[in-house]
Image (tube, grey):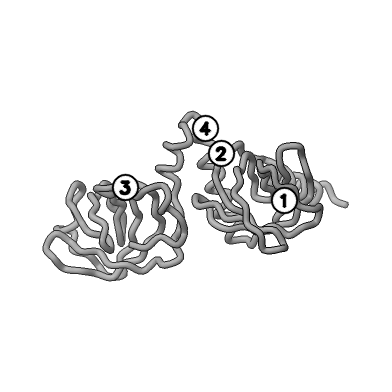
């Protein structure tokens, strides 16, 4: 085996093993179809560590849903006194997305969990929405990502620059928001009234 290949493998293995300490609520399903609440205490792009009194069998396929990060599945590879761990093989797209989310969490360890949840971004399943500008005109738009407190919107049409001003109010779907950043083809806005934590998941609609 060449040194270059060994180096590439070592980088890959290091990346997967770089777990992030988290404190995320979720639900998981056993092969029997039974569902249980759980706490995720550690996570990487290849592994999830659960804190739960429920003990599956080694090799069981587990499906888990985390409202902040979405759904994942993997196989039980380790049991512990406080829970178990599953190993995952993600698609390239999902691997990249989760890697970015975990990097964000790792870089915000100084924040408490409520603050992290407030700003954690997700990509909803239903991304198409409308944007109503202050002049009353509506435009079709696409949601790039959304958090409890705000949304990143990409417009499918050229919005008049004179209308899009930082600090001006818009309505994204049915949610009033204030624009705090502009970029080519869209904007980032903060909601006037944040979503409740219980509503922040990939099924959210605007």
x, y percentage for residue 110? 49, 29
Q: Which mark is residue 23?
A: 2
Q: CA distance from mark 2 to mark 1?
A: 17 Å
x, y percentage for residue 114? 44, 37
What is the secondary structure assignment of the residue under circle 4? loop
Nearer to us: label 3 or label 4: 3
- Residue depicted at 39% across the width and 50% down the height: 147
Residue 32 figure quarter:
bottom right
Residue assigned mark 1:
86
- Residue depicted at 73% across the width and 52% down the height: 87
Residue assigned mark 3:
194
Of the numbered discs 2 and 3, the one sitting upstream in the chain is 2
Asked whether 139 or 112 is in front, the reply is 112
Q: CA distance from mark 3 to mark 4?
A: 22 Å
What is the secondary structure assignment of the residue under circle 3? loop
Disc 2 vs disc 3: Cβ atoms closer than 8 Å?
Answer: no
Tell me if 53 is positioned left or right of 116 in this view: right
Of the numbered discs 3 and 1, the one sitting upstream in the chain is 1
Residue assigned mark 4:
109
- Residue depicted at 47% across the width and 32% down the height: 112
Callout 2 crowding tier (Cα within 10 Å): few <14, some 14–19, many ≥20: some
Tell me if 97 is positioned left or right of 164 in this view: right
x, y percentage for residue 200? 42, 52
Disc 2 vs disc 4: Cβ atoms closer than 8 Å?
Answer: no
What is the secondary structure assignment of the residue under circle 2? strand
């Amino acid at each position: 085996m060449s040194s270059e290949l060994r180096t590439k493998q070592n980088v890959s293995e290091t990346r997967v093993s770089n777990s992030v300490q988290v404190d995320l609520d979720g639900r998981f399903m056993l092969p029997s179809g039974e569902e249980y609440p759980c706490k995720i205490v550690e996570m990487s792009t290849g592994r999830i560590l659960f804190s739960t009194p429920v003990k599956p069998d080694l090799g069981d396929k587990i499906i888990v849903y985390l409202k902040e990060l979405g759904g994942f599945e993997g196989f039980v590879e380790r049991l512990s006194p406080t829970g178990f761990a599953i190993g995952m093989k993600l698609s390239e797209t999902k691997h990249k997305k989760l890697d970015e989310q975990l990097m964000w969490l790792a870089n915000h360890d100084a924040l408490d969990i409520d603050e992290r949840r407030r700003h954690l971004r997700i990509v909803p399943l239903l991304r198409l929405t409308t944007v109503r500008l202050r002049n009353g005109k509506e435009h079709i738009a696409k949601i790039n990502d959304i958090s409890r407190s705000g949304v990143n919107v990409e417009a499918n049409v050229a919005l008049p620059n004179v209308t899009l001003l930082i600090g001006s109010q818009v309505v994204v779907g049915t949610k009033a928001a204030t624009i705090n950043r502009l970029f080519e083809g869209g904007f980032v806005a903060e909601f006037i009234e944040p979503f409740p934590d219980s509503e922040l998941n990939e099924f959210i609609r605007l």
